[in-house]
Amino acid sequence: MPGKIKVKVLAGRNLPVMDRSGDTTDAYVELKFGNVTYKTDVCRKSLNPQWNSEWYKFEVDDAELQDEPLQIRLMDHDTYSANDAIGKVYINLNPLLLPGITPLIKNVWTLEAALNSSAGSQGSVMTGWLPVYDTMHGIRGEVNIIVKVELFLDFNKFRQSSCGGIFSAILLIGSAKDIHSDKTSVLATILAKKQYCYI
């Protein structure tokens, strides 16, 4: 089932000083999902940049939505040398695909779900301030973004999406007396005695 990710970068705050001469930062944001990358405009000489960017759109398949994180990288623009990395944010989009988990993520995000039956799409929205992290320096400010995910429900009536499906493993527990040389008989014995539990 195809879908669409829309991302809007609103602002940053408390970014570190990257240009020592002016005690400021010339920040911009790179958004990456899969092989597609977008870049905001450079907000010059500010530690609290305001981008209010356009909506950046990624056309995706539901398998990609579950496997790939949305990558957000804040950079400092340098005219005469290589641009410097401020930090990164990786966003797992699975909360936008799973119904009923809103209370678990309210502390960081605002999550809204909407069903637009006339358009044949289901969508969820996350918005909020996220910490920007660098492995050497720790948290280096925050970025405010809006992420929308829309799934097209009526694209193919004969293919069901795996979005929202959660799989679990089964641990089989048997005693030593149940072990035989034939592996299938061990499994059959354990299942017959109902000596298993879900993890």
Image: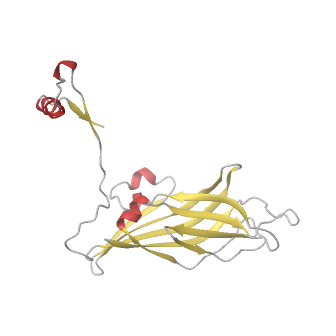
Tell me the residue at 41%/71% (across/down): 60
Horizontal arrangement in the rendering, residue 192 relative to residue 7 (left or right): left
Quadrant of residue 62 in the image? bottom left
**Where 54 sits versus 138, above or below?**
below
- Residue 93 is situated, as x and y percent measured from the top left of the image, at 44, 61
Q: Which residue reaches farthest right? A: 21
Q: Which residue reaches farthest left? A: 192
Quarter of the rendering occupied by the N terminus? bottom left
Horizontal arrangement in the rendering, residue 70 relative to residue 185 (left or right): right
Of residues 154 and 187, which is closer to you in this image? 187
Quadrant of residue 153 in the image? bottom left
- Residue 59 is situated, as x and y percent measured from the top left of the image, at 43, 75
**Where 74 sits versus 136, above or below?**
below
Tell me the residue at 45%/70% (across/down): 148
**Where 138 sits versus 91, above or below?**
above
Of residues 179 and 42, which is closer to you in this image? 179
Horizontal arrangement in the rendering, residue 150 relative to residue 189 (left or right): right
- Residue 40 is situated, as x and y percent measured from the top left of the image, at 63, 75
Quadrant of residue 65 in the image? bottom left
Quarter of the rendering occupied by the C terminus? top left
Q: Which residue reaches farthest top? A: 177
- Residue 143 is situated, as x and y percent measured from the top left of the image, at 62, 63
